[in-house]
Image: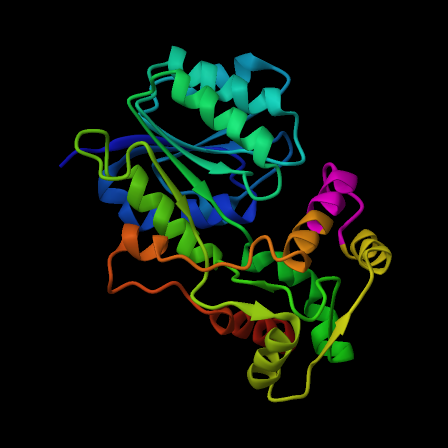
Amino acid sequence: MSKFTIFVSGSINLPAKAVVKELNKHDDKITKLRLGLLPGQTILDLVRGYTEVFYINPSERNTINVALEGVDAAFVWDSEIEDKSHLNDYIDIAVEKGVKQLVVLSAYNTSPLAAEDIEKYIISKQIPSYTFLRVPFFTHHLSLYTDSIIKEKVLPLPIGFEGTFSPLDDRDFGEVVATILLAGVTENPYNKMIYTLTGPKLYSGPQLAEKLSIIMNDQIDFRGTSQNEAEAFLIQAIPSEFPNKDQLVKHYLEFYRLIRDGEIGMTTDDVKKIMGDEKSPRDIEGYFGEVLLQTIST
């Protein structure tokens, strides 16, 4: 059985953490699992005997050089809140170091032109195997509203009453990425593919509130808010010490605009294409049921 040295960038971020958690279930296929963190970050709950932690300063290419030495496959992501040159550095160094496989979380849905440039750049580098993943909306983006749901019985979102979206559970994303990374390079069925990953159902704001009412066994109302109200909420809800907070707020507001304007009202079967027909992506109650119930019990 082939074993791989795998690098996961931004390992403290929720999608990347989900990837690491899933890879940890396949330790028989992993020689080394390298986690890329920013200086000062820790993720002790994810560390195993084969784990190596590398502190990456995006402005210092040498830190990326060291992290990618001897790596077979890597998960990297196109962050909307970071300088695009940082991802280019990852790609260039991956080529220099002979990384054979890349799985890339694309920012296509919020920054299509910039994301297409990144995707074209990767294709031009003739990496043996690469896969692009586009996620219109992650379920964890809604975790900021946990207190509002529990304490005020309200879900306030600036998405109008008609806009729909299909949130993807982080755990499904982790399973998809791990499956692709562990497929290797030879005869990899996911090579040179682009997938758009969604949850199983579309929800409008009122429909999501109705679902939350069932989960909570209590009445949760949807409140359509303005962009200004949403911005004020996000500024208060996102911790001030969060890196690039201003950019993150803009990032959230762009997601809401996409929903409101009907640009990400879609579902796909791409999770099943990768995981098999027997694997359906988790619906929203799986995530919110756990988050809300855990919050209530603490």
Going by the image, does 241 lie left or right of 228?
A: left
**Residue 52 can be seen, yes or no:** yes
Count of numbered circles in the view: 0
Residue sitting farthest toward the left: 1
From what the image shows, is residue 242 above or below residue 284?
Answer: above
Q: Nearer the viewer, residue 66 or 84?
A: 84
Residue 238 image point, x, y percent: 75, 52
- Quarter of the image that includes the C terminus: bottom right
From what the image shows, is residue 51 above or below residue 100?
Answer: below
Q: Identify which residue is drawn at 61% across, 31% down.
A: 38
* Quarter assignment of residue 222: bottom right
Residue 106 image point, x, y percent: 50, 37
Q: Nearer the viewer, residue 35 or 211?
A: 211
Q: Identify which residue is drawn at 51% across, 39% down.
A: 11
Q: Nearer the viewer, residue 67 or 113?
A: 113
Going by the image, does 59 lie left or right of 4?
A: right
Going by the image, does 119 lie left or right of 86?
A: left
**Residue 57 can be seen, yes or no:** no
Magenta span covers which residues? 238-252
Colour convention: rainbow
Q: Is residue 160 magenta?
A: no
Q: Identify which residue is drawn at 80% across, 66% down.
A: 225
- Quarter of the image that includes the N terminus: top left
Residue 244 image point, x, y percent: 74, 36
